[in-house]
Amino acid sequence: MRTGTFDYTINGRGTVSDAVELMADVPRLVTMHPLAIATRAVPPGPGVLRSTAVTSRLKLGPVAMKITYRADLMVRGDDEVITVAHQQPRTTLRSHVRVQDAGDGRVRIGVGITFEAPSPLFSYGFAKARFAHEHMAAEIEKYLNA
């Protein structure tokens, strides 16, 4: 198993509560995800607030494949959101969001990502996760500033 992390910040207009609501809404966020093609609600397990199955289309050279992972909303606090996504085999992406009031009707959303996968899958999966989250960050910022 290998683990990697990355962080990013989103700045936009709005309130802390509106930003938390957005960052906790996996189906709405997935509309901003460059690889996702479908979502469906799935029954949450113990200690999970909401679960969503997300299907993405990935390419590896000339080969396109669909993968489905489960995104579990674990924490939705006043200024914090924690989501854990699980995919087989033994791949996990943990997103820890903190939202701050930046003053003048603006918010700052800090996102920390921890990605863990079996060594043979790590480089490809980590690169795809980073690409998708960078794209989503830009789309979320556009959405907040529209």
Image (tube, grey):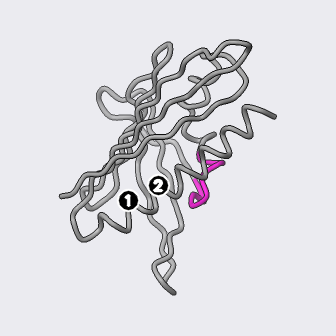
Q: Position of residue 21 (x, y in %)?
A: 59, 24
Image quadrant for the C terminus?
Answer: top right
Q: Residues within 10 Å of mark 1 (few under 14, many from 20)?
A: many
Image quadrant for the N terminus?
Answer: bottom left
In percent of the image, x 66 and y 39: which residue is there? Answer: 140
In percent of the image, x 71 and y 20: which residue is there? Answer: 14
| Secondary structure type for disc 1 | helix
Q: In the rendered view, would you say 15 is above or below 66?
A: above
Q: Position of residue 94 (x, y in %)?
A: 36, 41
Which residue carries the number 1 mark?
A: 126
Residue 11: which quarter of the image? top right
Work out which residue is located at the far left of the displayed protein and give it: 1
Which residue carries the number 2 mark?
A: 130
Q: In the rendered view, would you say 66 is above or below 141?
A: below
Q: Position of residue 58 (x, y in %)?
A: 50, 70
Q: Position of residue 135 (x, y in %)?
A: 60, 52
Residue 18 among those drawn in magenta: no
Q: Which residues are magenta?
A: 30-38
The reply to whether discs 1 and 2 touch (Cβ–Cβ < 8 Å) is yes
Amino acid at circle 2: Arg
Q: Residues within 10 Å of mark 2 (few under 14, many from 20)?
A: some
| Secondary structure type for disc 2 | helix
Residue 102: which quarter of the image? top right
Work out which residue is located at the far front of the displayed protein and give it: 103
Amino acid at circle 1: Phe
- Residue 86: mark in rendering: none
Front residue of 19 and 38: 19
In percent of the image, x 33 and y 50: which residue is there? Answer: 115
Residue 37 among those drawn in magenta: yes
